[in-house]
Image: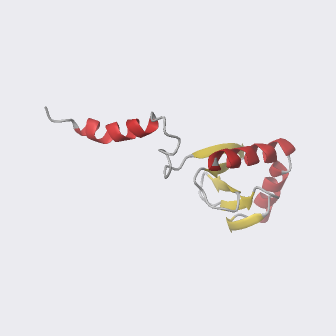
Amino acid sequence: MKPSIEEIILTPILERYFSDDPNILQGIETRERIGTLGNMQIMIYSNDHNPPHFHVKSRDRTIDAKFKIENGEYLSGTIDTKGIKRINAFFNDIKVKSRMEAIWNKKIN
């Protein structure tokens, strides 16, 4: 019997997902939301490049910026001064920074 299109597509995905091999999901990007400030979402992407950083994106796509996890420094992207101040205030909460560091360190291990 010929496999269905669903089986052809889903079988390899499910096999990767349920595998015991911790490296099997390499190359698959996920994101973890750290928080939301108004219309801005703060996220860390797995399999992202160095330096350790987080992304800030708005729902209306007018904001798309990166900041260092180490010190909250603005790296690049589109965001206004008011948005940077809001991100810095959010980042300066010690719990937020330690959570970001833990997420980043987890993703590279």
Left or right: 91 in relation to 39: right
Q: Quadrant of the N terminus?
A: top left
Residue at position x 45%, y 35% in the image: 19
Q: How many marks on residues?
A: 0
Instruction: Relative to 22, say whether 83 is above or below.
Output: below
Q: Position of residue 69 (x, y in %)?
A: 76, 55
Q: Position of residue 97 (x, y in %)?
A: 80, 48
Left or right: 15 in relation to 69: left
Residue at position x 51%, y 45% in the image: 23
Between 106 and 53, the residue placed more toward the observer is: 106
Q: Position of residue 72 (x, y in %)?
A: 80, 58
Q: Is residue 39 visible?
A: no
Between 15 and 36, the residue placed more toward the observer is: 15
The residue furthest front is 21
Left or right: 6 in relation to 24: left
Residue at position x 42%, y 40% in the image: 16
Residue at position x 59%, y 55% in the image: 60
Between 12 and 81, the residue placed more toward the observer is: 12
Instruction: Relative to 64, say whether 11 is above or below.
Output: above
